Amino acid sequence: MRIGYGIDFHQLVEGRDLVIGGVKIPHHKGALGHSDADVLLHAICDALLGAACLGDIGVHFPDTSGEFKDIDSKILLQRTKDLVTREGYAIINIDASLCLEAPKIKPHIAAMQETIAGILGITTRDISIKATTTEKMGFVGREEGLTAHAVCLLRSI
């Protein structure tokens, strides 16, 4: 068994889509990044890569590469799963937390779980997604950015 932890941060800006967990969420701001800036999928990728001792998302999908400009992070998650599988691991579960003031995430969690489960080949019962705010404190509280944390458990296959 291997445990992995991932964390990601992105700025929130006008004029960008807000994509979290592979789901486009209606909001007046979106995440800024080289890819689609899906903070949740990036944290999950880092957790999976870390558990398999494969480095981090920047090693495999650098933001200096034009190949990954505006890429759908669901593709990055699929490629990460493939790397982890080739390394000889299967995913047991994912536990993730989002931190943002707005919009409310609860209505979108089931769709996120379905999207992630479909990519990773696990069930929605194996993916926990929670959301919280910072009670208006810090850059998250001022709606300048958002963060995601993820933990995963892998087993040897």
Image (cartoon, rainbow, N blue to C red):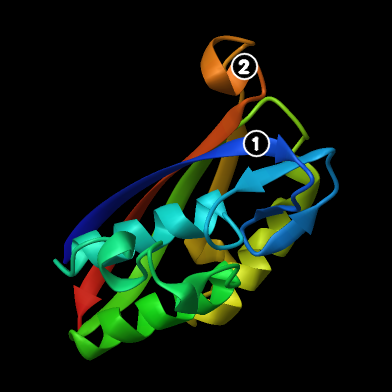
Question: What residue is at 64 percent from the left and 11 percent from the top?
Answer: 136
Q: Is residue 69 left or right of residue 1?
A: right
| Residue linked to disc 1 | 12
Crowding at mark 1 (Cα within 10 Å: few <14, some 14-19, many 20+): many
Asked if the residues shown at circle 2 and circle 1 are in contact, with their CB atoms under 8 angstroms apart, the answer is: no
Displayed quadrant of residue 45: bottom left
Residue 115 appearing in the image = yes
Report x, y in % for residue 36.
Answer: 61, 61
Upstream in sequence: badge 2 or badge 1: 1
Residue 153 appearing in the image = no
Q: Secondary structure at mark 2?
A: helix
Quadrant of the image for the C terminus? bottom left
Placement of 99 over or under 83, stated as above or below: above
Q: Secondary structure at mark 1?
A: strand
Residues at marks 2 and 1, CA–CA distance in whole angstroms: 12 Å
Amino acid type, residue under disc 2 in the picture: Gly
Question: What residue is at 42 percent from the left and 58 percent from the top?
Answer: 44
| Residue linked to disc 2 | 141
Crowding at mark 2 (Cα within 10 Å: few <14, some 14-19, many 20+): some
Report x, y in % for residue 70.
Answer: 60, 67
Displayed quadrant of residue 37: bottom right
**Residue situated in front as seen by the camera: 10 or 86:** 10
